[in-house]
Amino acid sequence: MKKRIGIAVILCCLGLIVGLGIGSLKRNDKQKEIVSKESAVSTEVGLENIAVGFSAEIVRQLQETADDKATVKSEDVPTVAAENKAVMEAENESVVSAEEVSENEAECEYINFVIADVDNYVNVRNQPSTEGEIVGKIFDGAVAQILAAAGEENDWFQITSGNVEGYVKAEYFLHGDAAAAVIDEYVVKTVEVQADRLNVRPEPSTNAARIGYLEKGEKVKLLEDCGEWLRVQYTTRKEGYVAAEHVMVQEGYIYAKTLVEEQEEAAARAVIEARGNITEQKASETLTNIEFPATTYTSNKELRRAIVDYALQYVGSQYVHGGSSLASGTDCSGFTCFIYADFGYSISRTPGGQLSSAGCSIDYSQIQLGDIICYSNNGGASCTHVALYIGDGQIVHAANSRKGVIIGRADYSPIVGIKNVID
């Protein structure tokens, strides 16, 4: 009986202590209630600290009583450590799943991707047989997507590439992991000419002799980016340099070609190859295929169009300060002066003289093709540079010794006057 009374007293003391703790927790805004299971666990975990100063025997008795009154299964109320472990395991599983998804996506991207690995090309046929009709060609390094395996032994691929769809022998292609491992090596860079005509030179300088030219829209392979100049594969056996500001650099893959596309590309290449056969000496002395002005025009509008078209033929020509001809090179005012001279107009040879005496002065809102725009590069009222207006807010002019004759924006520099020489 005394033993039970002693235990009861101790429990009352502990109850008072816990009660005070609960009262304190109730005053805390962040803890409004105590869950009975959490209290039982906290009591069980902290028994050793609470029992400081009590005899070992009383602690043992208190432990037995507490076990009898509140038996809590570990699986019902997990400890904080167990909860943290479960959260960490869930996060790890989530990370692994994300990595697996990423790997699967990378695999799926190339699972049906093939690269032609041949000396020249492979025929694409309309059925998985060498008896099938040829519908196109896929050249070495070209890429395609596999639509299905075909043939009696699945030794053919049904593919789509560019505008071509058909069947090819599987043995001539890299695919799967082999294709994915080398795909970056098959990206091809080309340059597409944006100017009406662009000279190709043996050295990255407008002072270098021309070895040929490229027309607007023509494309050649880019070999090296040298900043303001690009080294290109001009013909099969000849490399050259073109001004970077007059081209658009494009990146992409080679694709199969239909028979018609192959013929058109071969014809275009033949034109460039023939053009590239011009000797450097001849190219340095004259511009090739320059069409000189006609003698009569039915209207001023037709005349203005002819002046612009004629001037655009000299895009890519070199700038020569004080130069005396369009063919061998001249400066800004020489360019406008000689262009007009070939149409029978006599204007000043200097920028200032063109501003003061060429034609009549007009406002920018009245500008037409072939009008001369006068600029001040030093911010003053005097004219230091001139150019021909070619429409759509653009000009053609002999810019400087670094750029040569180029196309540019009409508002690139302060305008001090506009001259109408025609009307």
Image (spheres, rainbow, N blue to C red):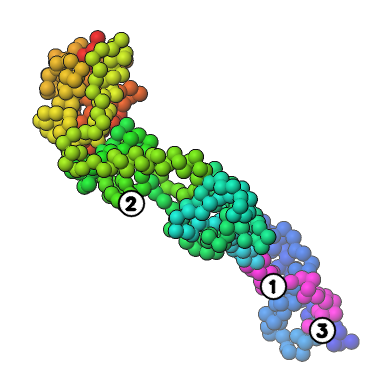
Determine the image quadrant of residue 416.
top left
Give coordinates of residue 17: x percent, y percent. Answer: 73, 72
Main secondary structure along the magenta-highlighted residues: helix
Is 17 rendered above or below residue 335? below
Give coordinates of residue 194: x percent, y percent. Answer: 35, 35
Between 109 and 272, the one lying in front of the other is 272
Q: Residue at x 28, y 31 (%)?
A: 407
Give coordinates of residue 151: x percent, y percent. Answer: 66, 58
Q: CA distance from mark 2 to mark 1?
A: 62 Å
Q: Which mark is residue 64?
A: 3
- Dots 3 and 2: beta carbons under 8 Å? no
Q: Give whichever of discs 2 and 1 has the lower sequence position.
A: 1
* Magenta part of the chain: 63-92
The residue that disc 1 covers is 82
The residue that disc 2 covers is 223
Determine the image quadrant of residue 168.
bottom right
Q: Is residue 83 magenta?
A: yes
The amino acid type of the residue labelled 3 equals Glu
Q: Residue at x 69, y 73 (%)?
A: 82
- Looking at the rendered structure, the secondary structure element under dot 2 is strand
The amino acid type of the residue labelled 1 equals Ala
Q: Residues within 10 Å of mark 3 (few under 14, many from 20)?
A: few
- Residue 318 seen from this side: yes
Q: CA distance from mark 1 to mark 3?
A: 25 Å
Give coordinates of residue 329: x percent, y percent. Answer: 16, 33
